[in-house]
Amino acid sequence: MACRSERPGTCQCKLDPVNSILFQMLNSGSTARTNLHQHICNPNRGCPCDGNRKVILKNPDVICKKASEVLLKTVTFIRNLPSFYQLLQDDQILLVRKCWVPLFALGLAQEKVDFEWEELSMPSLLKKILLNQSSNAGEITFPSDAGVPYKEVQRLQMFLHKLWSLDICTKEYAYLKGMVLFNPGIKGMRFPQYVYTLQLEAQQTLMEFTSMMQNMSQGRFTWMLEALDILKAIDSEVITELFFRPISGEINLEDLLLETLFFS
């Protein structure tokens, strides 16, 4: 989505291609003068605002393989929960579709999968013009589906490092995954109350366990809940694009997970 500057002729990233001498020379006439009244920061024109930066994995072969292993362990975790298979299959399917991303992110944290990224390089406006690759500088566009937003990757890494700083043990990860998987707030569930009971059980067990580990202090449990809040904003398309598309191409991970869980 384009980000609009509050002050005409300026961009949030402090770089103003509209007001540059080069841009005005290349876009002479009424177009440049009109654009001075309101500059829209557009990722397709290579504006470097943080909100428009796109990134990719630095070592996709290595990291994507680790991500696939994490996904397989996520499936194994679900399979080993008798309470999950006591639900109606319609509710099971809804839970998998809506909860596989936070489960996968918890798996990345548990397996200590750290990763480096690099910014997706975009040809500069000047280079495009000098190579005569466009007849109009204002029409220059870049692929909109390449890479993932920098802010999304930053959010995921923030979540991972927050959990790593807590040095969470295997039991705590299991309880956290139970809290995430049994989400009664998903629309369309047949028996949300039973799912809520399962979530509450996982939450209370985690709270008692962390309290025992921290001499009756609730601080550790609170920090974990704060970390889980970050997960709510992580999008499935970002996870798919970043960790699986580089080696698998176009793939629907939700369908793959469901097929593995119910038809294998």
Image (cartoon, rainbow, N blue to C red):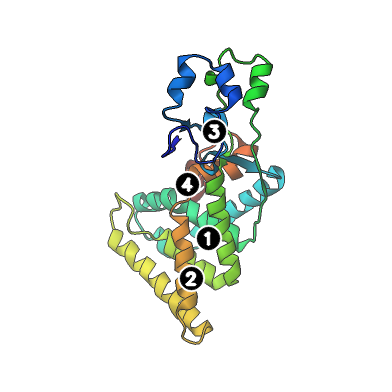
| Cα distance between the residues tagged 2 and 1 | 23 Å
Whole-number angstrom distance, CA of label 1 to CA of label 3: 51 Å
Q: Is residue 188 above or below residue 13?
A: below
Of labels 2 and 1, earlier in sequence is 1
Image vertical order of residue 139 relative to residue 242, above or below: above
Residue 223, label in figure = 2
Which residue lies at the image location 60% right of the left edge and 54% below the top edge? 70
Secondary element under disc 4, as helix, strand or loop, is loop
Closer to us: 100 or 219: 219
Identify the residue position indicated by label 4 in the image. Answer: 235
Marks 2,4: beta carbons within 8 A: no
Q: CA distance from mark 4 to mark 1?
A: 21 Å
Taking 54 as reference, is 220 above or below it? below
Task: Give the number of the mark in front: 4 or 1.
Answer: 4
Point 56% across, 58% down: residue: 158
Which residue is disc 1 drawn over? 77
The residue that mark 3 highlights is 16
Comparing marks 3 and 2, which lies closer to the viewer? 3
Looking at the picture, does residue 162 appear above or below residue 117? below
Q: Amino acid at mark 1?
A: Phe
Q: Secondary structure at mark 3?
A: loop
Residue 160, position as x, y percentages in the image: 57, 60
* Mark 2 crowdedness (10 Å alpha carbons): few <14, some 14-19, many ≥20: some
Helix, strand or loop at mark 2: helix
Pick the front one: 136 or 251: 136
**The N terminus appears in which quarter of the rendering?**
top left
Please name the residue shown 45% across and 65% down the image.
Answer: 226
